[in-house]
Amino acid sequence: MPPSDQIPTPASKPSMNDLKRLWWQDGVTYQIYPRSFQDSNGDGIGDLNGIFARLDYLVTLGIDAVWISPFNPSPMADFGYDVADYRNVDPIFGTLDDFDRLLVGVHSRGLKLILDFVPNHSSDQHPWFLESRSTRDNPKRDWYLWSDPAPNGGPPNNWTSHFGGSGWAFDQTTGQYFYHSFLAQQPDLNWRNPEVRSAIYDAMRFWLDRGIDGFRMDVLWLLIKDDQLRDNPPHPQWNGALLPLYTADRPEIHQIVAEMRTILAAYPERVLIGEIYLPLRDLIAYYGFDPNTVDLRGADMPFNFHLIQTPWNANSIAELIRNYEAQLPRNAWPNWVLGNHDQTRLATRIGEHQARVAAMLLLTLRGTPTLYNGDELGMTNGTITPDQIQDPAEKNQPGQGMGRDAERTPMLWDRSAGAGFTTGEPWLPLNADYANTCVEVQSQAPRSMLALYRRLLELRRKHPALHAGVIDHVTAESGVLSYRRHFNDQHLQVFLNLTDDLQTITCEDGRVLLTTILDGEGGQVGGKLILEASEGLLIALD
Ligand code: NOJ
């Protein structure tokens, strides 16, 4: 028995600083939307060989892991989020051999590869659904959500699709409706059926055995629906909308997430990320905290999208950071996201100046940052004319601002005709300003957005206080958000001016590690300081 002064008390249990840190905690994730990243064969659509050709860019950028949106065989009704074969590569993107080559290329550069996996629904062209819809007594009938019509012949209940209209589609052949959370070409799998679970888990193992480093699970909070098919109630705040009480975040989901975690646990250091749009309290539950063992049994990182949803001002963001940190279960690792292929581009949401402040925020907060391809260039939403619309979310609900094409326009590499993205006709138009925004130009401009991201990523990698340290002193004063990061005897402070005006701050003595205007590095500071409009400052305290 150890002497009593060495018996760990709750207060002296290991902190995050002492625990073994994992690659997905220390590292930064970069999302690649493969259709728009790099085309290698001139068809105007990006592909796996294109990504391979750009791996060195990712190394010089300074990220650690790539998450690639789906590239499985797909009719592309929802651009790959309608999977027709969970164990292969769509010819548009390449072959399994191309994938294997890409994985070797990723690993040989010390990077990790995270696969996007779509467990909630398949394509209606998936052999499972073709079988399921063939007859009512097909063995795979119960693999999807089938139901008789309501007494009036209409849909079984009021559940809607995220892409507009009823979520139920009538199947003439068998006289029943099937449920689809998204397009009718994306029927929802029945996660109450154990065969479905094991088929999906086998598909996960297929990719884990090939050597991938983890999954980003699509719409993880939607996987399981009410078994009694109860109507969703009216939304208390949004007139005419429904509260997704019976179609989202059902209690049974946590068992499924725990099962997924068990699949990954058979492989060393694989990461499970969940796409989950929920209020903090409900989101946190996806870590799967087990109060009996204080272990986590859920996702390693339930994606935290709250920086996208929170009003862009110092008070709101300070409150968000404090609330999130306070609610995280013990040993749960935080994460932050500023953009993805479903959201208006960051620089369009908050403007190009604040986008620089946001870069410093994302890369100096505690927890794994996920960066969306093109945000490191400050790309804005592209302009999509009506005849260029591709996204089914827009086509189904025209004019309601649901379209996502504008944030999916091609990566801008150089000043050539196809911006270095393609030698053909790009599937979505290039952003008009590409000759100024592209990597080629920004790489040569010492104060560009790209230069800022590279510097931030370099500092985050170099300083344990940034990639592993604790966070405290989160404050908001006169529109300036501030916080400190600490690791052992290193103490850093961040000041972010979220306003368009000069602001005066008071800081302890220290040395400037970085400013978002990329000026004044290394200078000594202390006492009263002026922050330029939309300026961020990272200081190493003495
Ligand atoms: C979430 C994905 O991010 C989005 O792009 C897709 O349309 C839906 N899931 C449906 O799979």
Image (cartoon, grey):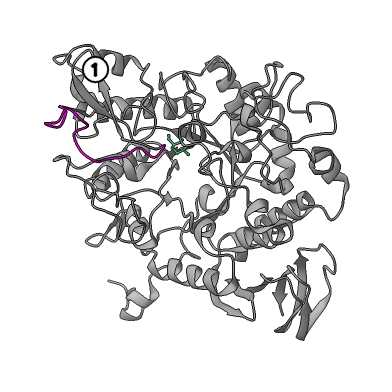
Q: Residues within 10 Å of mark 1 (few under 14, many from 20)?
A: many
Q: Is residue 150 visible?
A: yes
- Tell me the residue at 72%/20% (across/down): 425
Image position of 284 (left or right of 33): left
Overall secondary structure of the magenta stretch?
loop
Please state if 228 lies on the left or on the right of 81 as rendered.
Answer: left
Q: Nearer the viewer, residue 477 or 427?
A: 427
Does 268 sit above or below residue 177? below
Point out the residue furthest to the left here: 151
| Corner quadrant of residue 85 | top left
Q: In which quadrant of the rendered view does residue 148 lie?
A: top left
| Whole-percent x, y for residue 270 in the image | 44, 40
At a point 47% along the width and 18% down the height, the residue shown is 75
Image position of 27 with respect to 132: above or below: below
Q: Which residue is mark 1?
A: 132
Closest to the observer: 542 or 216? 216
Count the labels in the image.
Answer: 1
Q: In this view, which residue lies farthest toward the bottom?
A: 527
| 288 vs 187, nearest the viewer | 187
For this orientation, the residue located farthest to the front is 152
Residue at the spot 53% in from the left edge and 75% down from the top edge: 472
Q: Is residue 489 visible?
A: no
Q: What amino acid is at disc 1?
A: Ser
Tell me: 416 left or right of 122. Answer: right
Task: Label 1: state its secondary structure.
Answer: helix
Residues in magenta, as a range:
148-163
